[in-house]
Image: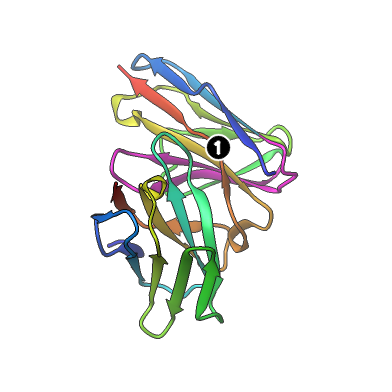
Amino acid sequence: EAAVTQSPRSKVAVTGGKVTLSCHQTNNHDYMYWYRQDTGHGLRLIHYSYVADSTEKGDIPDGYKASRPSQENFSLILELASLSQTAVYFCASSDRGGKDTQYFGPGTRLLVL
Amino acid sequence: SQLAEENSWALSVHEGESVTVNCSYKTSITALQWYRQKSGKGPAQLILIRSNEREKRNGRLRATLDTSSQSSSLSITATRCEDTAVYFCALNTGNYKYVFGAGTRLKVIA
C-alpha cells in the first residue's frame, strides 16, 4: 500500500527559530506536495516538486522553503518561524501530478511560541 | 472567493441514515475527488470522478458530477459512527495541483 511518513509528528518551536519538517514516501511517485491546514479550514498548497533537486512554489510559499534531495524525500523548511505558521502540515505524493489520487502522510502539528 | 466549496459547514445524522455532502466549484476541471479526513489523520481519497463521468460508486458511497452546473455530491448510505469525519472535495484542474474546499464536518450519532 502507498505510504507517506512524516517526522516529527509534533513540534514546538520558538519564534525566529529554524524548523525542518521531513517527508518520506515509498510509492515511487514523482510528485510530492506540502500543505498546511489551519483549524477548521481546508488544505493550502505551500510547495510542490515533480522531480528530485527541483521544487516549485504553491499558493502560499512566503516564509517557507522546500528541498527535494531524492525522489523519496521532501522537506519543508521554516528559516525564521513565526506565530502565524502554527498549523498542521501535511505531505502528500501522487503519481501523475494533478491527474491522480494524492496519498497523504499523517501530518505534523507545529506550534510556534 | 473559493474555487471549491462544500455547501455545509457541518452535518449530523443518526447511524443508519443516509447523508449527502455537496460541492460547488468555479473553474473547469478534469476530475473531482472526494477525500475523508478523520480526526488526527491525513486525508484519504474516497472517490475520483472524471469530468466525462456522471456517477461513481464505492461501496456505500456514491459520487455524482454535473459539469454544467459545476457541482458534485457525495452520498453515504447506511451511515456508521466511523463515518464521522471531515469530507473534502478536491478539484483536478489539469495541471499539477489540487484545489481543496474547506470541508464538511459530518457527525454520525449512535
Rendering coords of residue B86 (x, y %): 36, 49
The answer to whether A9 appears left or right of B13 in the picture is: right
Q: Nearer the viewer, residue B22 or A14?
A: B22
Rendering coords of residue A106 (x, y %): 51, 34
Helix, strand or loop at mark 1: loop
- Whether residue A92 appears in this view of the structure is yes
Going 43% across and 18% down the picture, which residue do you hit? Answer: A11
Q: Which residues are magenta?
A: A25-51
Q: Quadrant of residue B87?
A: bottom left
Task: Let me know if residue A44 is in the magenta part.
Answer: yes
Q: Quadrant of residue B16?
A: bottom left
* A55 lies above or below B22: above
Determine which residue is flagged by label 1.
A105
Task: Let me know if residue B49 is in the magenta part.
Answer: no
Amino acid type assigned to the residue bearing label 1 in the image: Gly
Q: Nearer the viewer, residue A38 or B58?
A: B58
The image quadrant where one finds the N terminus of chain A is top right
Going 30% across and 16% down the picture, which residue do you hit? Answer: A113
Going 52% across and 43% down the picture, which residue do you hit? Answer: A47
Q: Nearer the viewer, residue A16 or A75?
A: A75
The answer to whether A19 appears left or right of A23 in the picture is: left
Rendering coords of residue A84 (x, y %): 30, 30
Q: Chain of mark 1?
A: A
